Amino acid sequence: MVAASSVIVLITGANSGIGYATAQVLAASSPKYHIIIASRTLSKAESAISSILSSGPTIQGTLSPLVLDITSPASIQAASHVVSATFNNRLDVLINNAGILSKSPDLGTRFSETLTTNVVGPALVTDAFAPLLLNARNPYVINVSSLLGSVERAADKGDVFYQTSPLGLAYRVSKAALNMLTVEQGKALGEKREDGRGGVKVFAVCPGLVRSNLRGEKEEERNARGRAGDPEESGRLMLSILEGERDKDVGKFVYKDGVSAW
């Protein structure tokens, strides 16, 4: 049984990488957090929960699994009904974390796969769960983006993010589109509610270059040839946002050390 005072957090793609690390950090931080581990398969969600619970005595929060394929409208609707019925028609936090970097040799396929998962998915998921978020006292939506999606930085020849690769093109475009989606979601959901409460606090967040399966499952891909950091750093950034430490940056594109240009 989840307490009425619990903060209900749904993380898409939470069975590995940044999503998993965020769930682990939240669960270790406080008993107030109940984290919904959303994954395309129940077995992966349950395996992630078992791994988190066995990671040490510091786990204080609670966790539950949810089947959610963000590329399937039917799966999204089914998941929203489950969460509504289980948690009294309320969701406090939605973290749109699931994403891909398509490696298809065909450019059109790369764009189709990447935009479907990285942009259309978060748009449909947020739309489906918006009524539950608006029932929460202090709701948040976090779209996991990337500084690679900053148009201003991509256009600056002197910036470290100026260079790209053929395989990275669709990914960069998808994150730029996700940033625009964040702005529009902030306008649609951020207004004060009729009862005087504030609206949903919407953020685009760059988690940094950390170990994950996004680039592939080989170790040199997971650790970006030794350049990737600990994904728990990303989890701690997410926690700081949910604890209100970045509320001055609502509606912006944030990362660990500040705010980025769109």
Image: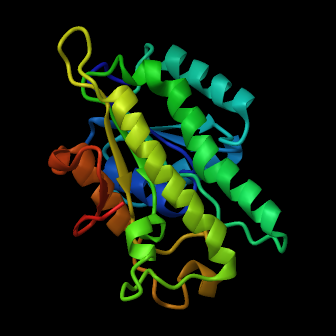
Locate residue 79 relative to residue 126 in the image: left or right.
Answer: right
Question: In the rendered view of the protein, which quadrant contains the N terminus?
Answer: top left
| Nearest to the observer: residue 166 or residue 228 | 166
Q: Is residue 61 above or below residue 246?
A: above
Residue 216: % across, % down: 67, 74
| Nearest to the observer: residue 155 or residue 169 | 155
Q: Is residue 198 above or below residue 66?
A: above
Locate residue 192 relative to residue 26 in the image: left or right.
Answer: left
| Nearest to the observer: residue 47 or residue 199 | 199
Which residue is depicted at the point 17% across and 13% down?
Answer: 196
Asked which quadrant contains residue 7, the reply is: top left
Residue 160: % across, % down: 40, 85
Asked which quadrant contains residue 139, the reply is: top left
Question: Does any portion of residue 226 appear in the rendered image?
Answer: yes
Question: In the rendered view of the protein, which quadrant contains the C terminus?
Answer: bottom left
Which residue is depicted at the point 31% across and 19% down?
Answer: 4
Residue 25: % across, % down: 34, 56
